Each structure stands twice: as C-alpha cells, then as structure tokens.
Image (cartoon, rainbow, N blue to C red):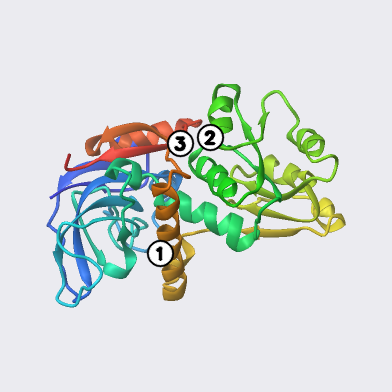
Amino acid sequence: MQAILMTATGPAHEVLQAADVPMPEITGPTQIRVQLKAAGVNPIDTKLRSRGVLYPDALPAILGCDGAGVVTDCGSAVTRFRVGDEVWFCHGGLGGAPGSYAQYKVLDEKDAERKPESLGCAEAAALPLVLITAWEALFDRARLGAGQSVLIHAGAGGVGHVAIQLAASAGARIATTASEGKANLAGTLGAERVILYQQEDFVAAVQDWTGGTGADVVLDTVGGDVFQNSLAAACVYGQVVTLLEPGTGISWKEARNRNLSVSFALMLTPMLQDLPAARRHQGEILRQCAILIDSGRIKPVVSEVLPLAAAATAHERIEAGHVTGKIVLSINP
C-alpha cells in the first residue's frame, strides 16, 4: 500500500516521504482492517516530525492520529463491525502503532467507532482528536454546565471551533478570542462575545462581558502569555484548563488569590499509557459527539483537503499558523 513515512526528524518536505509499504495484516481475533478514506492533520503531527516520535527506535514511522474509512476485513471474534461499515477513530500515529497517513490501517475493534451518518469521511477524519480534547477539557476537567460562562481561546482553530459548539450544546455562555478575519466564523459557531485579541485586552473584555466577575471556565489552547493572562480572566473559584505546558516563569499569585483550579488536558495519555478504561471513555465521547453531529449541533470546519502525497504541505500550513478549523488528507478517493 501507499503510505507517508517519517524517515527522520526535520523539515516536512525532507523527512515525509511517500513509499510502498506492506499491507497491514490482521493478527488478532478482535482486529479490523480499514481502508482509509481520509486522515486528519493535527499540530501534534508536526511536533512529532520536528522533535521526534514518542517511542524509541520507531523510525520510519507513519504519523496521523485521526482517520475515517471503510472496514474491509474482520478478525474471527469481531462483533461490533461488519465489512462495509464506515468508522472513525483516533489511534496510533505517535511512533508505536502506525498512524493514518496510509491507505489501510489495522486496529482493534474497541478503538474504532461508527462514523456519524451525516458526515463524509473527510469531515469525520478531521474531528476525533479535537472532539475528545475539547470534551475532556470542558466537561471532564472543568465540569462546564448550563448557564456557566466560558472563555475559549482561538475559537476558529482546530480544538477551539469544536469547543465552542460543545459548550453551546451544554447551554453555556461563550466568549472566544479570534482574529478579525475569523470573528464572523467564531460568532456563527455559537460564541456570544468574540474578542479581537489583536486589538483588545482579552482579560478586560472578559471582565466587562461577565460584569466584573470573570469567566467560570477558561480553555487555553495557545499557551505562553495567554495562559498567564488567562488566570486573571477566570472568576474566583474558577477553572482554567490548558492544552499546553505553561512554561517557566509563570506567576501563580493570581491563581492562588482566586482559588483557581488549574488542570491539563492531553487526550493522548490513554493511548501512551495503555489505559483501557480511559480509552473506552474516549470511545463513548465519540459516540455522544456523533449524536450531536447527526442532530446538527456540531459541524466541522475543514479549511483544506489535500491528497495524501501532500502531507508535507499540510504540515507546513499548520506550522505557518492561523489555520482555520482543520486540514485533511484525502486517501483512496
């Protein structure tokens, strides 16, 4: 089959190479083989390519955590799927199990879910990682509920655009940061207040929006100074969840004075640490999100669909910054 191999760490066009590799074979009774139709491209892919995969001696590796496609073969004990079923998943691509930048993939049936019926494979492949990330951050960590206020940074980005829609589905009031060119999109997704971060102080804007109390929940998808300043945007006893390492030199005085709960969301942990119960929970998240998608409450934003051979170009687009929504690779069209 055709796949994109990461052969070393380095620039995208130097180390991502199209290659013929052996077709993956089913080796366990509960495994399925999926003919991939699309793969999502995420910032983690670019970080792994530039810094190194997360397992030793794993190169060459096939990157890509998100995928969607059609089941073509089933192991003897598979009960959840049949040949011809359309599935989506977030699995592999970190240097251990092969990822989704390939024409076919084998995985255990418990690691895949039925694709939302209302989405094509390209849209479906864009979503699993960001949906699970946003869900775990907003609901599992911050316990966001109806009537609460939430500030979601980078509301037109990959995680941000689904986080807004998930928060809206829960009945929360939403503010988000965006550039002027993406403000309209953020508003149409469900944000009540769109803060033009290049022109406004988001802390002052949130304080004004909440009548001086601050947001019940802040979701930081940016890091650095945004994380530091987010501590002042949260209310007393509020929740701040970040997807990134805060870095050194953080002043925690504001967090202490406000009695904030600060937590992290890394949806890759169950895969990296082989936590079956946590993986099952992530599958349930995808099942719940499929219901929301098929009812029209969540819609993916796919800014670009590129052929599999253009994986390096997709990486360069993400590294250049300011991608709207997600970039997807089309496979086996």
Q: In this view, does 302 lie to the left or right of 171?
A: left
Residues tagged 1 and 2 counted as in contact (Cβ below 8 A): no
Which residue, given by chain and number where applicable, does mark 3 sit on? Answer: 325
Q: Which of marks 1 and 3 is in front?
A: 1
**Foreground of the two, 287 or 65:** 287
Element on which disc 2 rests: loop
Element on which disc 1 rests: helix
Sort mark 2 into few (<14), some (14-19) or many (20+) by Cα contacts within 10 Å: many
Point out residue 291 in the picture as x, y percentages from the top left corner. 42, 54
Number of marks in the rendered image = 3
Q: Is residue 268 left or right of residue 311?
A: right
Point out residue 327 in the picture as x, y percentages from the top left corner. 37, 37
**Foreground of the two, 9 or 261:** 261
**Foreground of the two, 253 or 72:** 72
Question: Vertically, is 160 above or below 55?
Answer: above
Which residue, given by chain and number where applicable, does mark 2 sit on? Answer: 156
